[in-house]
Image (tube, helix red, strand yellow):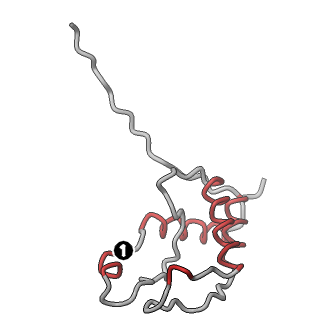
Amino acid sequence: MAGTKRIPLNRQYTPSITPRAVELFTEMRALVCTCEPIDWAGAYWERSRCEHCDKWWTLHARLHRELRARLWDWPVIESPASVCPYPEGSVAARDWRPDERARVMWRLLEQAAVTPPPAS
């Protein structure tokens, strides 16, 4: 039986930052959360999100599709200014790490939002 020579393909994900993706990102950044602070000592799992947070996640899903991101790239963006949302000393806080890939995407979209498109 002859052996098969497999040549690995180097398929790197390269997002395509479209004008629509920049529009969605700009719309998302304009939303301001009005949620009540999380009561970690209470029934925090019963907390509901404000309408701006609901809208943000709806736009996020659209942005995810627009960027043609992979299913496991969720969230697709994360603010570089975000901090650990969990109470200090908790297991969740100990294990929390910023999503560097999502932070890079945020910066790319932020840069695209301020850079004018090339003249045609």
Q: Is 120 above or below relative to 32?
A: above
Q: Secondary structure at mark 1?
A: loop
Q: Position of residue 96 (x, y in %)?
A: 36, 76
Q: Is 51 above or below relative to 59?
A: below
Residue found at x 49% / y 92%: 39
In the foreground, 2 or 34 = 34
Q: Position of residue 57 (x, y in %)?
A: 63, 68
In the foreground, 111 or 47 = 47
Left or right: 96 with respect to 77? left
Left or right: 91 with respect to 22? left
Q: Please identify the quarter of the rendering in which residue 22 is found.
A: bottom right
In the foreground, 120 or 71 = 71
Neighbour tally class for label 1: few under 14, some 14-19, many 20 plus, Cα within 10 Å: few
Q: Is 42 above or below relative to 60?
A: below
Residue identifier under label 1: 97
Disc 1 marks which amino acid? Arg
The extreme right residue here reads 120
Q: Please identify the quarter of the rendering in which residue 52 is found.
A: bottom right
Counting labels gives 1
Q: Position of residue 14 (x, y in %)?
A: 51, 50
Left or right: 85 with respect to 120? left
Residue found at x 51% / y 61%: 74
For the N terminus, the image quarter is top left
Q: Please identify the quarter of the rendering in which residue 18 is found.
A: bottom right
In the foreground, 58 or 15 = 58
Q: Is 78 above or below relative to 2?
A: below
Residue found at x 51% / y 50%: 70
